[in-house]
Amino acid sequence: MSVAAVRLPPLSLYVHLPWCVRKCPYCDFNSHALRGEPQMARYVDALLADMRRERELAAGRPLLSVFFGGGTPSLFPAAQIARILEGVRTHFDVADDIEITLEANPGTVECADVHGYRHAGVNRLSFGAQSFDATMLEALGRIHSVDDIGRSVAAARAAGFGNVNLDLMYALPGQSVAGALDDLRHALALGPQHVSWYQLTLEPNTVFYARPPAGMPDEDTAWAMQLEGQALLGGAGYERYETSAYALPGYRCRHNLNYWRFGDYLAIGAGAHGKYTAPAGIRRYAKPAHPLAYIEAQEADGSRRESQPVGAHDRVFEYMLNVLRLTEPFTETAFAERTGLPAERLHDQLAQLREQGLVEGVGGGVWRVSPLGQRFLNDLQAAFLP
């Protein structure tokens, strides 16, 4: 199967809004602490110029989702979010049921803005709660209080949001299994449609990586938190559909699913990364990382898109890196359609992994990650490194 025969996958749009009030010590995202009033209007002008140039890559496909990430997108007033979404509707076709997510910090959301976001077209809010323990929030460098979380969710409900996600972390410094489960119970009491519950990891180029906090739970304790938390979430009706994602029926995050299924996604904003499928092959690109550099590039000649082809070996790894995170089975047919490579490229590796008990063959070219593979996911993914 040639690359030209790849079926064009679904398409999403990622919008990066890079500022935050204070950078958290665990954060390795391209975010910049707010020092004075950021040039928001000028930045949105740059986003709109960037968007006009990105539309050629849509190749007639409608957007199935838009995701505002950061940084802290909720620092941007609703009027600026509305400008961006007006640009989206002008330059792209959009699905009738498009999912539009905005990440929000409970400490930066005002009730008026929540109503404004909903009026602008945002239909999914994702709150970075992280913990319901004040001591843990302080250790994580969060600016919001425990009470802010409940107030923000209530404001979202009052504004008409019927799709709310809460981000939570576990394996925090000094946290016990009971403490992790208590966080989950507090989150579930607020009735979110979706919970992203993920383990704190010490990423390079972060304060925590340079100076690890004391009292980090060991591997066995973190595993116990994960197992007991999964049982608690399952008992409350939340289906685990990805390593760290849990949703009530009908509320899986379509944007993230498109990443994990190796879909295409366009990207605008400082440091944003995109991937698209074209007749010449699959390509990746990135925008200038610093907000000012990004703005100046768009004002000068933003038509330059520094893209790189994704070679065959990298396509194998990147596809498997993503799809193995999902709890749903994966198929050789989907691999061939999304990568343009023959499914036979997987056969030897999958046979070895089946012998090791990390994957299971369902039959007919259908596979799934075993319970052992879910526990040792990093090892499983690494088996496909070029």
Image: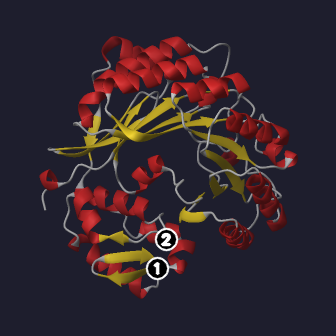
Numbered circle sitting on residue 343: none
Nearest to viewer (mark 1 / mark 2): 1
- For image coordinates 62% across by 63% down, the residue present is 238
User: Looking at the image, which residue is at 38% across and 57% down?
Assistant: 261
Q: In this rendered view, identify the residue nearer to me: 87 or 326.
A: 87
Closer to the camera in the image, 44 or 253: 253
Q: Is residue 104 above or below residue 81?
A: below
Residue 32 in view here: no
Indicate left or right for 204 with 2 as reference.
right
- Residue at numbered disc 1: 358
> Would you say residue 273 is visible in this rendering?
yes
Q: Which class describes the residues within 10 Å of circle 2: few (<14), some (14-19), or many (20+)?
A: few
The local secondary structure at tag 2 comes to: helix
Q: Nearer the viewer, residue 174 or 108?
A: 108
Residue at 72% in and 44% down: 129
Label 2: which residue?
A: 379
Q: Amino acid at mark 1?
A: Leu
Q: Residue furthest right?
A: 135
Q: Quadrant of residue 354?
A: bottom left
Q: Position of residue 317 (x, y in %)?
A: 35, 61
What type is the residue that disc 2 sits on? Asp
Q: Is residue 268 left or right of residue 117?
A: left
Quadrant of residue 309 within the rendered picture? top left
Give the side of residue 118 with respect to residue 231, left or right: left
Q: CA distance from mark 1 to mark 2?
A: 9 Å
Residue 300 spot, x, y in % from top left: 34, 12
Q: Position of residue 162 (x, y in %)?
A: 61, 43
Image position of 20 with respect to 35: above or below: below
